Each structure stands twice: as C-alpha cells, then as structure tokens.
Image: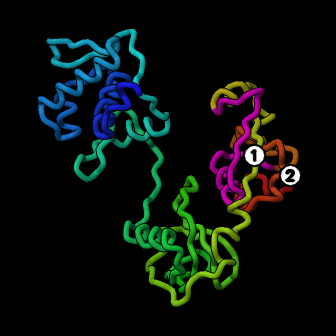
Amino acid sequence: MTQMDNLSHAQKQRLAFIDFSLQYFGQVSRQDLIKKFATGLAAATRDFSSYRTLAPDNMALVHQTKSYHRKPEFTALFSHEPEGILHGLAKGFGDGLSHPISPSEICIDAVQLIHPNTEIIAALMRAIQNKQAIKIKYVSVSSGEKSREVVPHALVNNGQRWHVRAFDREHQVFTDFVVTRIKLIAAAETVPSFNETQAKDRQWDNVVTLKLIPHPSLKHPEAIALDYQMQDNQLEVQTRAALAGYLLRQWSVDCSAKHQITSGVCQLALSNTEVLNEVEHIAIVPGGASR
C-alpha cells in the first residue's frame, strides 16, 4: 500500500488541487487552499506537508509571495483529463453550491449551449432512473405544441442542444426530443412495455465506426491530421448509430459519395460512406442527401 492509499478522499481532493494549481498556474498558497475548501490554516499546512512528502521535488516556498512555486523538475502527482481541465479553466472550478464559480478571463469557451430548465431536467432524469413513461407538452417546428407520451432512456448533448432519447408512443418509434422544447412533464398512466425500453432501441445499441480523413481537396492535409491526432491520416471514431449523424454534422464531415463538397466548409471526409446505411438523421449530415 502506498502513502496515497492511506489518504481519505477529501485529502486526495485537496492534494489534487495543489498539484493542479502548480501545474497550470505555477504557484499555490495556503490561502488558496483555505478559500477553495473552507479549511483552517493548520489543516492547510498539513496538506502542504503531505504533498511535499509525496512529491518533494515539485514545489518550493517563496517567502516574498507567501506561495509555493512550481519547480522545474515538477512531475504531476495526479493525472488530469484534458476535457475536464479545459472546461474547468474556462468555467471555473467552484461547484456552484458551497464554492462559487468564477469563470476565467484568459481561457474562454466561446460556444455555449442553451441549457434546459432544471426542473425539466430533474423530471426527465427521475423518469429515466425509475424506468417510467411520461406525458409531455412538446413544441415542434413542424406541428407546434402537442401532448405526447414517451418513455425516455437517455439525455444527450448532441453538440448544439440537449435532447432526450425516448420511445414515442404515438408513432411507435425511438426518436429524439429537444429538451428546451418540453414545456411540461407529468406521469403517464401506464408503465413501459419491454418494446418501449432502451433494450429495444436498435439504433442506440448499434455502435458504428466512422473512418475520418482530411478532406481530399485540402492543400495541406497534415494540419487536419494534427487537429484530430490522426494515425496514418485517418481517425476512427466509434459512436452509437443514433448519434453518428450529429457528430458528422458538428464536425462538418463531407459524407458525399466522392467527397464533392469543395467549398472549404468541410475539412474532414468520411472514407467508409457505406456506414451511413446504419445511421439515423442522414438528412442533417453534409452530403448525406447526395448519396
């Protein structure tokens, strides 16, 4: 058993904060730790002592700033996932409850989703968790406001908005409902049948592989290969068939048979276009209609 294994979860969180601050900001103080975790001075001192025991070459106290500064030989004690780090840097690392969120002014997430009403999200999550059917008042672009009975099984961020994957009892199909268009939720009178559950959602359970390449029209395809960390100028992405169309649209992937979109809008192309036979929402993907 290592020294790290003897620490409580709360202690590990505080040491991870010290580690993160040193790695990404270059310094951290006891006051930073006290402000973040509402701990006392003595406890903060113990945490820094524990961190120095685990990583003696990572930081040095600079008395002029009253902070610990990152040393050149620093080696991260904790692994930090890029997605979580960039999101945290942009949005702030508070939890929004006991610790306020303070967005960054130097790391900015320029694209933001319009988030649904929290009461709607809560009602959907309860229905999903408890495997319940619900009645919703839903406003669609084509038919306006209607009452529907659905059996939801997943909430999904499709890159543009949040939607709920559900069985639509009126049309007897699994489909997507945009969460922000749901005005009201109530319990349905009947429980879901097996045919209405996620286990019968073939498009959801079918995982497909999308083989993406730099668009053939590009003069310098290596730039795109670097953007997507491609190996041998190809990136294989596995996704649910129900979600593949959204990904192809969000990444502007040319899905036409001979990669005919040469306007510069598409910097990626789909090399295995036959996979589109298994994918929902072909109409929304670039070049999908020309197949």
* Vertical placement of residue 98 versus 9, above or below: below
Disc 2 and disc 1: Cα gap in Å?
A: 10 Å
Query: How far across and how far down the image is residue 166, in percent?
Result: 60, 72
Nearer the observer, 277 or 129: 129
Query: How far across and how far down the image is residue 105, in percent?
Result: 33, 35
Local secondary structure at mark 1:
strand
Nearer the observer, 125 or 26: 125
Can you identify the residue that label 1 sits on? Answer: 210
Label 2: how many Cα within 10 Å (few below 14, some 14–19, many 20+): few
Q: Is residue 59 left or right of residue 269?
A: left
Residue 272, by quadrant, is: top right
Local secondary structure at mark 2:
helix
Where the C terminus falls, by quadrant?
Answer: bottom right
Magenta span includes 151? no
Q: Residue at x 70, y 46 (%)?
A: 238
Label 1: how many Cα within 10 Å (few below 14, some 14–19, many 20+): many
Q: Residue furthest left?
A: 41
Can you identify the residue that label 2 sits on? Answer: 274
Residue 157, by quadrant, is: bottom right
